[in-house]
Amino acid sequence: MAYLSPSQLQKFREDGFLVLEGFWSADECVAMQRRIGEILAEMDVPLHCRTEFSTQEEEQLRAQGSTDYFLSSGDKIRFFFEKGVFDEKGNFLVPPEKSINKIGHALHAHDPVFRCVTHSPKVQALARSLGLRMPVVVQSMYIFKQPHLGGEVSSHQDASFLYTEPLGRVLGVWIALEDATLENGCLWFIPGSHTGGVSRRMVRAPAGSAPGTSFLGTEPARDNSLFVPTPVQRGALILIHGEVVHKSEQNFSDCSRAYTFHLMEAAGTVWSPDNWLQPTAELPFPPLYT
C-alpha cells in the first residue's frame, strides 16, 4: 500500500510538495487517457459555452468569471479551451481534441474511471498516512497542456482558489499521464513556500453581478531563481500542499497530460463561502474513504 515513510512525510512537511514516482502503472495511465478520448468523442459544446481559458489575471476575470458555465461547473463535467482556437463566431480553427485546455470539475464524481482512480485504495492509504481523518474530494480536472498551444500557468497557490479556515487543509494530487519534462511544461515549485499564508484570493461575486469573480490581494513578484523544476515519469504522483507556490511553463513538445484532484480535510474545517467552487445539493463533496 502507498503509505509514506517518516522521511517522505518529513520532506513533504518541509518542502510543501512530494514526488512519488511509479505510483500508477502504464496500464492505469492508458485507461485514463482512453476514457478521456471517449469523453472528447462525445463532446457536444454549445456555442455559448466556448469559454476561452487563460491564467493571465484580466483574462481570467473576463473569460471565466463572467461565464456562468465556469462558475456552475463544480458538480459537472465541462470543457474549457485554449486561447485562439475559435474564430469570432465561435467555430473551431483547430481540431476540437487539439483545442481543449482542461475538463472539469467533477470527473471524480460522474465518471466511473476517474472515480475509481480518485478513490483507489492506494490514494486512500496515502491520505491515511498523511493523517487525514475526514478527507473529501472538492474538485478534479484533466489537464491537456496542448503542444505549442498549451499556455504557461503563472505562479500561484491552490488555496487562493480553494480557501479554507484554518489554512493548511487542502491537498492537491497531480498525476502525470505522460512523462512531464522541462520541454512539455512540468511543474515548478518554490520549496518551503507553503508556510507564509495566502497572498491573493479569488472570490465569487454576489449572484448575478458581473464579473462573476474578483481577486482580493495581489500575487507578489517572485524571484524565478527560487523555483525548482520537478520533471517526472509517466505514472508519477505529486502531492501539493494547498499553499505551496508553483507554476508550469508552456508545452513545446508533442504530448503532455495530467489528471489532478483536490482533497480537503473536512474535520474542523470551514470551506469558504466566498470560493468560486461550492458544494451543491446534487453533489456535496464526496468523502474520499469508501
Image (cartoon, grey):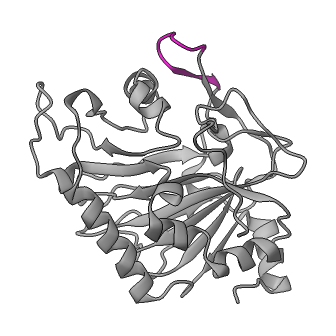
Most common SS among magenta residues: loop
Furthest-front residue in this view: 282
Residue at 81% from the left image edge and 71% from the top image edge: 130
Give the left or right position of residue 46, taking residue 30 as reference: left
Q: Which residues are magenta?
A: 206-216
Give the left or right position of residue 54, taking residue 44 as reference: right
- Mark yes or no: residue 50 visible: yes
Residue 177 location (% of width, % of height): 41, 74
Residue at 43% from the left image edge and 33% from the top image edge: 70
Residue at 19% from the left image edge and 38% from the top image edge: 84
Q: Which residue is nearer to you in this view: 101 or 264?
A: 264
Q: Which residue is nearer to you in this view: 218 or 121?
A: 121
Q: Which residue is nearer to you in this view: 147 or 103?
A: 103
Vertical arrangement, residue 82 with respect to residue 232, above or below: above
Rendering quarter of residue 89: top left
Furthest-right residue in this view: 268
Residue 194 location (% of width, % of height): 75, 53
Residue at 47% from the left image edge and 12% from the top image edge: 210
Quadrant assignment for the C terminus: bottom right
